[in-house]
Each structure stands twice: as structure tokens, then as C-alpha cells.
Image: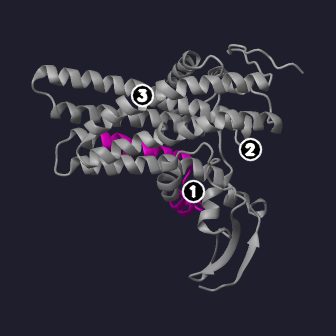
């Protein structure tokens, strides 16, 4: 390869060259000769891990299974597609396809079907990470993209989890009463697992809103409704028409659970005040230890990885028991009281009261 190169800036590209990519801080645009023609592409002056960590959210809220397994693979994929017209939304769509395909493989009895389904589910999680990382690398994150990402998670789990239930039922179908008991336990696990991931997602968003000057993840139900009303009358895609009802269902359900789980927090994310270092220090001090537990076991990445791993070994019933007994013991026995105490004291010390919140006693000025 001819080494004649120069560094450029995305703003200096012709419009047609930069409509699909915005160059992040971790990359530089280079023009070089390849196979007799000049081509543009990104150069990553940082090392792999430095560039990788710049593409993810703060590690204070990231799940370890994502940080060390899903997201490194996703970063390789994001780097590969960075200079192409492939959009983050397209990758989100692929994650949905892989998630649904995993569920089909779990219920379709063919040789190694559980292992194939587990791989597809695992790769769906990698794609689910890659879309956000690519958007952050290009600096093209959007409210619609985050909405679509959440909808993708819901569709994936609605495909993979019931299919896993079918696998478990076939193991314990006879006698009938045994199968009925196992299915009742499975439904209880599925419902409580949705509480786990929903609460982790909520507290992750609250943590980022209060402790990070750069990341403002998530939105509240009221803001989503206002955004939907604002785009009424405009031409919308089929994907958008499907995504909005699913997104509203998730947002409304999450808000209802949040208010019952912890009256001292707030689901009104868009009512939070701007970043303030003093508030950040208070919230990090009080909620940080609880967040370490939330992110370790209760996120969507951990749920999907567990489903993929135990299905691959042919024993998803063990994962059912672990989530139903161990994780629920931590969730209700430790996390709920600890998070309530942290929320109550943090918002009291910050003198912050939001519309849907049970007001703690204010700290005297």
C-alpha cells in the first residue's frame, strides 16, 4: 500500500462523503492510495482498549459481562462498519432478527438446536451493544435510536425467554402436575426478571443524569408522549409505527414499577436539573455501592448471557432456579431496602424534589 496520506477533518469532506459518518474524537480521517485509487477512511490513533473504553458508557454503570465480553466484540464490529453506510439502526434491526431466530432454534428440534440458538442469542447481545457504540463513535446518537434499542431488547427477550420456557417444559412435562408447577415457577421468574432489568435500567439512567456531565441516557414517559405528539402528521416509517406502541408499553410499565419499588426516586428523568458537581458527589457516595450490585447481576446483558450459556449446556432449568431464588433474594432482601435508603438520603441532601417523588425532609440551608 502506498503510504501517501494526509489527515483531514470530517467538516471539510464533501457533503456526500460525510452524510453517513461523523468522526469521533478517537478517530482521524485519512486519505490514502489503495489499489490505484484514493480512498477515505478512519484511522484510530488510540490503542484498541483506549478507543474501546471511549466508546462505552461510564464503567460505574456498565455491566461487567458487557464490558469484558459483549462490548469488546461489538467494538470490533463497530470499527469495521464505521466507514460504511451501515447505520446503527440497521444493526439494531439485525439484533432483533438474531434474537427472534434464537427463539425459533430453541423450540425447533434439530441436532444442536440449543447450541445454535444460544449462539444466535449471544450474537444478538453483541449487536445490541454495537449499535450504541457505533452511534457514539459517529456522534449520531438520537432519541429514536435509543427507543429502537429498547424495543429490540424487549422483542429479543419476548422471543428467547418463552422459547426457553418451552425447553424447560419438555424436560418436566410428565407427570402433568410437575409440568404445571415448573411452568408457574418459570412465569414467576420471567416476571421478576423483568423487574430486575427494568430497575437496573432506571437506576443506571438516574445515576448518569446526576453524576455525568456528558451522558443523559433515557427519557421519561411524559417526554416520550410529547415527542410522539410532536411528530404527528409527519410521514413515519413502518418501523416507527411498530416501535412506538411497544416503547410506550415498556415506559409506562417501568414507571409503575419504579414508583412501587422506591418512592424516593423519580421516573421523571427529563425533570432532573442540569449536572452539578456537588450533587454528583452526593449521589455517587450514597448510590454508588448499590449501583455496583445492580450492574453486576441484574441488567439485560447478564440476563441474555445467562439464557444463552445455560441453554448451550442444555440445562436452562438451573438458570431458572438461580434467578428465582438467588437473584430475587438479593433483589428484595438487599437491593430494595438499600436503594430506598440511598435514594431518600441522596435526594434529601441534594434538596431535590421531583413531581412523582415522595419528598424527604429537606436539609437546612
Which residue is drawn at the image coordinates 79% and 36% (left, top)?
A: 275
Question: What percent of the width, then of the height, locates residue 97?
Answer: 39, 43
Question: What percent of the width, then of the height, locates residue 73?
Answer: 48, 58
Determine the secondary structure under disc 1. loop
Q: Earlier in the sequence, mark 3 or mark 2?
A: 2
Q: CA distance from mark 3 to mark 2?
A: 33 Å
Q: Mark yes or no: residue 231 visible.
A: no
- Which quadrant of the structure image shows residue 341? top right
Residue 327 against residue 253 in the figure, above or below: below
Q: Which residue is mark 2?
A: 214
Is residue 107 or residue 203 the one in the foreground? Answer: 203
Which residues lie in the magenta part? 74-103
Q: Which residue is mark 3?
A: 328
Question: What percent of the width, then of the height, locates residue 297?
Answer: 47, 39
Q: Which quarter of the rendered picture does the C terminus lie within?
A: top right
Q: Is residue 92 magenta?
A: yes
- Within 10 angstroms of label 3, few (less than 14), some, or many (20 or more) residues? some
Which residue is drawn at the image coordinates 59% and 53% (left, top)?
A: 134
Q: Which residue is mark 1?
A: 85
Amino acid at each position: 500500500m502506498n503510504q501517501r496520506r494526509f489527515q483531514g477533518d470530517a467538516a471539510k469532506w464533501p457533503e456526500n462523503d460525510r452524510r453517513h459518518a461523523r468522526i469521533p474524537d478517537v478517530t482521524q480521517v485519512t486519505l490514502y492510495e489503495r489499489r490505484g485509487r484514493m480512498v477515505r477512511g478512519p484511522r484510530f490513533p488510540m490503542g484498541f482498549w483506549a478507543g474501546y473504553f471511549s466508546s462505552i458508557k461510564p464503567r460505574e454503570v456498565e455491566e461487567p459481562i458487557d464490558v469484558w465480553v459483549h462490548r469488546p466484540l461489538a467494538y470490533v464490529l463497530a470499527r469495521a462498519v464505521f466507514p460504511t453506510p451501515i447505520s446503527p439502526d440497521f444493526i439494531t434491526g439485525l439484533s432483533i432478527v438474531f434474537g427472534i431466530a434464537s427463539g425459533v432454534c430453541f423450540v425447533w428440534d434439530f441436532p444442536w438446536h440449543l447450541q445454535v440458538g444460544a449462539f444466535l442469542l449471544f450474537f444478538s447481545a453483541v449487536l445490541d451493544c454495537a449499535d450504541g457504540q457505533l452511534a457514539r463513535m459517529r456522534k449520531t446518537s438520537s432519541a429514536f435510536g435509543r427507543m429502537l434499542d429498547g424495543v429490540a431488547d424487549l422483542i429479543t427477550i419476548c422471543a428467547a425467554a418463552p422459547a426457553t420456557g418451552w425447553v424447560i417444559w419438555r424436560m418436566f412435562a410428565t407427570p402433568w402436575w410437575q409440568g404445571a408447577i415448573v411452568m408457574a415457577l418459570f412465569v414467576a421468574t420471567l416476571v421478576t426478571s423483568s423487574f430486575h432489568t427494568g430497575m437496573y435500567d432506571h437506576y443506571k439512567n438516574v445515576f448518569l443524569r446526576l453524576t455525568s456531565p456528558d451522558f443523559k441516557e433515557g427519557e421519561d414517559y411524559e417526554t416520550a408522549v410529547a415527542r410522539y405528539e410532536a411528530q404527528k402528521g409527519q410521514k413515519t416509517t413502518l418501523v416507527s409505527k411498530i416501535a412506538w406502541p411497544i416503547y410506550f408499553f415498556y415506559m409506562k410499565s417501568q414507571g409503575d414499577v419504579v414508583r412501587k419499588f422506591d418512592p424516593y426516586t423519580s421516573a421523571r428523568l427529563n425533570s432532573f436539573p442540569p449536572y452539578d458537581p456537588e450533587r454528583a458527589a452526593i449521589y455517587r457516595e450514597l448510590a454508588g455501592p448499590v449501583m455496583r450490585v445492580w450492574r453486576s447481576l441484574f441488567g439485560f446483558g447478564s440476563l441474555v448471557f445467562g439464557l444463552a450459556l445455560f441453554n448451550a449446556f442444555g440445562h436452562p432449568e438451573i438458570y431458572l432456579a438461580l434467578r428465582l431464588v438467588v437473584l430475587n433474594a438479593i433483589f428484595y432482601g438487599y437491593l430494595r431496602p438499600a436503594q430506598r435508603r440511598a435514594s431518600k438520603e441522596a435526594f434529601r441532601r441534594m434538596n431535590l424534589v421531583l413531581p412523582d417523588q415522595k419528598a424527604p425532609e429537606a436539609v437546612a440551608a
